Image (cartoon, rainbow, N blue to C red):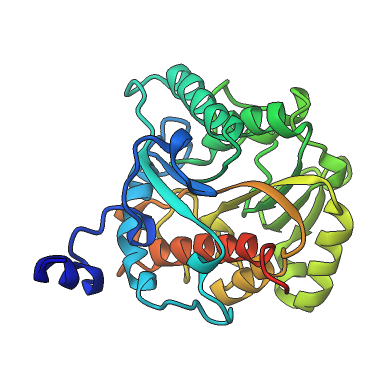
Amino acid sequence: MTTLAKKADHSLYSNAFGFLRQPLDFDPVNCDADWIVTGVPFDLATTGRSGSRFGPEAIRRTSLNLAWEGKRWPWDFKLNDYLSIADCGDLVFEAGNASDLCESLEQHAESILLSGKRMLTFGGDHFITLPLLRAHARQFGPLSLIHFDAHTDDYDQGGQFDHGTMFYHAIQEGLINPEASVQIGIRTHYDQENTPFQVFDAGYVNEAPVTEIIDRIHMTVAHRPAYLTFDIDCLDPAYAPGTGTPVCGGLTSDRALQLVRGLQGLDIVGMDVVEVAPAYDSADITALAAATVALDMLYVQASRKTDR
């Protein structure tokens, strides 16, 4: 090995293109990884401030601050000892064409899932979860949804491509089982009497013991295949200002991370982190929160392969 190559192994910023310094692999179907990271630079379905198309780039760049740790606190093992990860870069689709985005993302996800791998996807706005759910539901059947957000995103108003209507369409298409799904951190208007979901609003989540919330999540989802989606605006704008629709009164990053870690033991078959809009960020704190949430999501998956 050359001196330059040896130095590269220890360099924090040099040639770091993928999430957590993972090398880019543009053939995810045939690689040996367990989980595939994909960026989806799409924000045409945004109703608030645009710019989340730059989210995947920001999350990857900021993840360099996490890559050097080896063992991520408070976990007592190294992620790479139990989980193999590959970053396949960003999805390629026709710019400005939301229909092509849907078709391209569904095909991309389906090919990866059929190869026996799982997906961690970075948005982009939250609409990307709908084509991802379509691909996952074809593979695993109707899913439980574990949804961190300030908004329920199940509104029946809006057009075909809207980041506030995905879960309305997901229910209509039979992709998710709302009675076995949870929404965490909600603090905008929704029909409390007729909501099909188990909603843990921000007032409850900020005050209740973390262990109580985790127990309720596990009871609701149980042993069903689940899809985990984390809209970064679930966090209070003090912890995540860089997003399109910030709402005060949200979760701290610490409480959100505790809840994510509490998902150990659930059958999570797909995950995404969305709505990072770096143009509105300050000192990369939103991107860092998103990268940290994603890392703990991967640790939850790795914990299934340990004796814990």
Q: Is residue 212 visible?
A: yes
In the depicted structure, whether residue 31 falls above or below residue 254: above
Q: Residue at x 53, y 49 (%)?
A: 35
Expressed as whole percent of the image width and height from the top left, the position of residue 85 reads 47, 54
Expressed as whole percent of the image width and height from the top left, the position of residue 301 reads 63, 59
In the depicted structure, whether residue 227 falls above or below residue 204: above
Q: Could you say which quadrant of the image residue 139 lies in?
A: top right
Q: Could you say which quadrant of the image residue 165 lies in?
A: top right
Q: Residue at x 58, y 53 (%)?
A: 230
Expressed as whole percent of the image width and height from the top left, the position of residue 171 reads 77, 30
- Left or right for 233, reference 15: right
In the image, 59 versus 249, the foreground residue is 59
Q: Residue at x 34, y 37 (%)?
A: 26
Q: Quadrant of the N terminus?
A: bottom left
In the depicted structure, whether residue 180 falls above or below residue 97: below
Q: Is residue 122 visible?
A: no
In the image, 193 versus 219, the foreground residue is 219
- Left or right for 72, reference 2: right
Q: Residue at x 44, y 48 (%)?
A: 244
In the depicted structure, whether residue 106 falls above or below residue 248: above
